[in-house]
Amino acid sequence: MTNATLKQLSQQLAAGAVSSVELATQYLDRIEALNPQLNAFITVDRARTLADAAAADAARTAGNAGLLTGVPMVHKDIFCQQGWKTSCGSKMLDNFISPYSAHVVEQCNAAGLITLGRANMDEFAMGSSNENSYYGAVKNPWDLNAIPGGSSGGSAAAVAARLTPVATATDTGGSIRQPASHCGVTGIKPTYGVVSRYGMVAYASSLDQGGPIAQTAEDCALMLNVMAGFDERDSTSLERAREDYTRDLNQPLAGLRVGLPREYFADGLDADVAKVIEDAVAELKKQGAQVVDISLPNTELSIPAYYVIAPAEASTNLSRYDGVRYGHRAADYKDLVDMYEKTRAEGFGAEVKRRILVGSYVLSHGYYDAYYLKAQKIRRLIANDFTAAFAQCDVILGPVAPTAAFNIGEKSGDPVQMYLSDIYTLSVNLAGLPGMSVPAGFDRQGRPVGLQIIGNYFGEAKMLNVAHQFQLATDWHTRAPAL
Amino acid sequence: MKWEVVIGLEVHVQLNTATKIFSGTSTAFGAEPNTQASAVELAFPGVLPVMNKAVVEKAIRLGLALGSKINQKNVFARKNYFYPDLPKGYQISQMELPIVEGGVLPILVGEEEKLVKLTRAHMEEDAGKSLHEDFSGMTGIDLNRAGTPLLEVVSEPDMRSPEEAVAYARALHSLVMWLGICDGNMQEGSFRVDANVSVRPFGQQEFGTRREIKNLNSFRFLEQAIKYEIQWQIDTLEDGGRVEQATVLFDPDSGETRMMRSKEDAHDYRYFPDPDLLPVRISDEQIARIRSEMPELPSAMKARFVEAFGVSAYDAALLTGSRATAEYFEAVAQASGQGKLAANWVNGEIAARLNREGKDIGDCPISAERLTGLIQRIADNTLSSKLAKQVFDALWDSDLSADAIIERDGLKQVSDVGAIEKMVEEAIAANPKAVEEFRAGKEKALNALAGQVMKASKGKANPAQVQEILKQKLA
């Protein structure tokens, strides 16, 4: 049963073939058996999960069940969840039990989903390999020597290892798409503003966006129906009519214009990855899609622009972790400044400190114009590139990352190499566009490779349509690692 | 050497919204520490600010009243620094694009009007309070005040004396209360002033180096602090020293200013636009609506009082010092039809008595209606000015009307010709010497006779009539 999709589980529960308690027990047993190898979870609370499952079963018996009532899921440890430790992968918040729930968590609870546990992640969502967690690296279920990607590595690994049918995740520079690609699962980052950031621990506020990771595009659509929606507690949440993201899943692709950006197939792209993407494009052509050659000329600039803007915002978003009101506080200190310094030196890991330093630097008096302001101008250019491209095509296709998952430890000593691997994902966040990753094959080492689909603003239903049609014709998304 | 003083003020005006600037938490003053601090004020992970639209409305009101430019797109920025009473580690404020820019505030210095230019006014959140006294060896934090909306109003360095600075602060204080955007309570910190003070030799173009006196919460302290600071700067310069740019605090006990931090210690606040908040956009319609809802402004009211009631410009300026005084005056002037008399009484007896008793016009024991009653009896000659003062005192101490007091105390002026003639004849008969003197051409003797008549009438005889009848009888 743990191999089933969200949709199948919902049908099984509705048919009475299984109860939520039985389902949760199966997943909890599997987590207990496999998580020691994978380290995909920071917190699991069997008693609480089973109590929630029993309540879901009772609701179903009382005739109050919705489509997803009683289906188990996992939350990335970045979403505040009342009564659960919300650590964000950091020692700083290791003792933080959230007194309130994020909008995303409230919506999932309201839909009747139950929580199996809290997924591991790079500390404060800073990382591309999930090696930056205070709770240790997450392993890729396809190859325990490989990274699962980051920062939502725990969410992607948990779905890939069938420890949950679905997990929430967040994407600031690729943190949904890249781990989904590396773990052979499907993930979507919606248009900025579609999913409320209320209760989502902030990394880079103008880029952060929540979304689901699941086995299939259809499951992602079902989850997006739950997660999306206007929330007045987030000023950047967009006030739009509710959408049914499943509405276009079954549209044929004939006449679809898919843009292939030249810059995404240039030097630096691994040959195996290139082959997987070519094959995927060929499959879509077979279904009637037309390929359009496009250019996104400022793609390369997305790396410096992102690594100025994101750390700038992060450097001040993380100022609240000062040891005064909650979270870690150094044991011994001689005065206020000493308490701040020791608390933050002890509470934050190396990558977080690096980004706080970079961010503080680029916002400093005398450097602001040369870095932050310049980066914002580049951001505008990148958005303009996409606007021009979408005049010629309906969706953009390309790789998610230059290579399949690299080995644990391979790049952790070289932050710049690590940053360069974000080349295909960063510009989507800078432009605020939706993007997704769909399993499309494997490299010669047997590590999964994802196809990236980039949509125009609010183009989620169209992207999910393309992904679903691709999944109807292929079986990459059904493959699970042997564990 | 002759020195010229240059002063600019930054005033933190606490806006009187029911809830905080970025959350729905109450702003009521005086609650138990940390009972008015939600997850937003505590800066829990994941919380976000949501703009309180009432703050924008109030800021626009002030901007319109000052004739300022309202920036129809304005932007919140983060001002970064670490302090325990600033839970986020940054204050949400405005930097490059404030909501209000420019404008002028007229102030009254002696009997002269002077226009002080405004630089800008921007919206921001207040910090919490650090309580150093109550915990030995530790500091307590009260976040009730955190997130209270402030409008920081910055003037140009247009003031040239402590008196002008106080006049400006008073004018702004009365204006924000006039507009109903601030409760004006200085003890509770609703109106706090920072003064930038420098001196330069008379005639010199460039400004001297300024020092900023922080957080003055009374007009008296403002004046004392600036006076001390000016003298300190002049003494320093005349002794051959230099004034270094610094932030100083005023100690009311010693009456001195002392250094808080030098320019070298100044923070780099790393301002940048807050990505959690969209730019504030203000439509033409919104501005037009707020303009239509504004109370009549003091300047307009002043002009109208001169025009409609014939009062002097100086009297009109005093009457429009507060909205309550202006409304009180207008009610009396309207009802009595005696603008000048009403102005004299409101600016004279009423103001003096309130001042003596430390009261506000709002606490005035004589309602506009009762003062109108008094003024009507003056206008129709029922009361002499002397009797009027007597009635005024009685009005102050009772709830009776002027007519009831006149009736009760028999204070009616006697204007009955027969009665006055009788008293005049008696006075002439009893004072032959004075009569003789008068007839010999000594005009003053008439006053002595009139005084006798007034005395006989216990002050109630109409003085004009007494004079007239005396002259007739002696002619």
Image: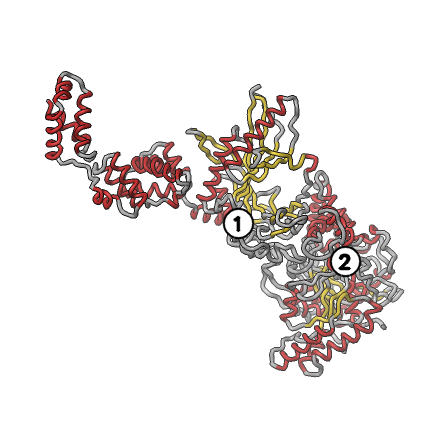
* Image label count: 2
Q: Chain of mark 1?
A: B
Q: Which residue is mark 2?
A: A91
Left or right, B55 with respect to A168, comes to left
Respond whether the residues carrying marks 2 and 1 are from the same subunit.
no
Percent x, y of residue A6: 71, 73
| Amino acid at pointer 1 | Val
Q: Chain of mark 2?
A: A
Q: How is the image coloured?
A: secondary structure
Q: Residues within 10 Å of mark 1 (few under 14, many from 20)?
A: many
Q: Nearer the viewer, residue A390 or A39?
A: A39
| Amino acid at pointer 2 | Lys
Q: Residue at x 40, y 38 (%)?
A: B355
SS state under label 2:
helix
Percent x, y of residue A107: 63, 67
Q: Report which quarter residue A249 is drawn in.
A: bottom right
Q: Nearer the viewer, residue A294 or A50?
A: A50
Left or right, B459 with respect to A324, comes to left
Q: Residues within 10 Å of mark 2 (few under 14, many from 20)?
A: many
Judge whether A392 appears above or below B9 on screen. below
Left or right, A325 with respect to A398, comes to left
Q: Residue at x 79, y 69 (%)?
A: A160
Q: Report which quarter residue B39 is drawn in.
A: bottom right
The CA distance from mark 2 to mark 1 is: 38 Å
Judge whether B462 appears above or below A104 on screen. above
Percent x, y of residue A198: 64, 59
Q: Nearer the viewer, residue B73 or A324?
A: A324
Task: Determine the residue located farthest toward the top in the rendered image.
Answer: B440
Q: Which residue is mark 1?
A: B55
